[in-house]
Image (tube, rainbow, N blue to C red):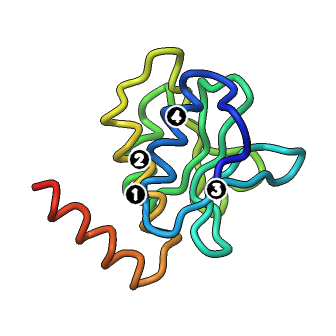
């Protein structure tokens, strides 16, 4: 389900990535921020500018990402594994997609992960 027109070109591309994942949907949460969820779990927060996102990562990956100045521990929810990523106006979309999928994997159920793995196998 889409919530209306994208706010920026980056929002449009993030929407395309997020909604391509099994059972993912878009909604608003906490002060009307656009988020993407699978089931009841959020896996992607968008900022209003379209130039930053908040995602979840396993502890090892997050520690590696935080060495790059584009990444920082997310305000308020960082203690739960969330980080913010300052993508800028022209991000590397392969990198963004990989990070979104990693975050999705931490929120999805086993059946959704099987569906995602099936989609990946079809692309190969």
Say which of marks 4 and 3 sits in front. Answer: 3
Q: Residues within 10 Å of mark 2 (few under 14, many from 20)?
A: some
User: Circle 1 is placed at which residue position?
Assistant: 102
Q: CA distance from mark 4 to mark 1?
A: 15 Å
Residue at coordinates 64% horizontally, 56% vertically from top-left?
Answer: 1
Q: CA distance from mark 1 to mark 2?
A: 5 Å
User: Circle 3 is placed at which residue position?
Assistant: 1
Q: CA distance from mark 2 to mark 3?
A: 22 Å
Residue at coordinates 59% horizontally, 31% vertically from top-left?
Answer: 11
1 and 2 marks in contact (CB < 8 Å): yes
Q: Pinpoint residue 58: horizontal percent, then vertical percent.
A: 44, 62
- The residue lying toward the viewer, choosing from 69 and 34, is 34
Say which of marks 4 and 1 sits in front. Answer: 1
Residue at coordinates 69% horizontally, 23% vertically from top-left?
Answer: 49
Q: Pinpoint residue 21: horizontal percent, then vertical percent.
A: 43, 60
**Residue 5: quarter of image:** top right
Q: CA distance from mark 4 to mark 2?
A: 12 Å
Q: Pinpoint residue 14: horizontal percent, then vertical percent.
A: 51, 38
Q: How many marks?
A: 4
Q: Secondary structure at mark 4?
A: strand
- The residue lying toward the viewer, choosing from 61 and 29, is 29
Residue at coordinates 65% horizontally, 31% vertically from top-left?
Answer: 6
- The residue lying toward the viewer, choosing from 22 and 47, is 22
């Amino acid at each position: 389900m889409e919530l209306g027109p994208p706010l920026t070109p980056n929002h449009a591309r993030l929407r395309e990535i997020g909604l391509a994942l099994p059972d993912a949907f878009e909604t608003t949460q906490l002060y009307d921020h656009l988020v993407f969820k699978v089931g009841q779990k959020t896996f992607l927060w968008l900022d209003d500018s379209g130039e930053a996102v908040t995602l979840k990562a396993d502890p090892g990956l997050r520690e590696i990402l935080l060495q790059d100045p584009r990444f920082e521990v997310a305000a308020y929810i960082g203690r739960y594994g969330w980080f913010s990523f300052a993508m800028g106006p022209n991000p590397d979309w392969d990198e963004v997609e990989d990070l979104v999928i990693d975050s999705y994997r931490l929120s999805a159920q086993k059946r959704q992960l099987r569906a995602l793995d099936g989609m990946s196998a079809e692309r190969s």
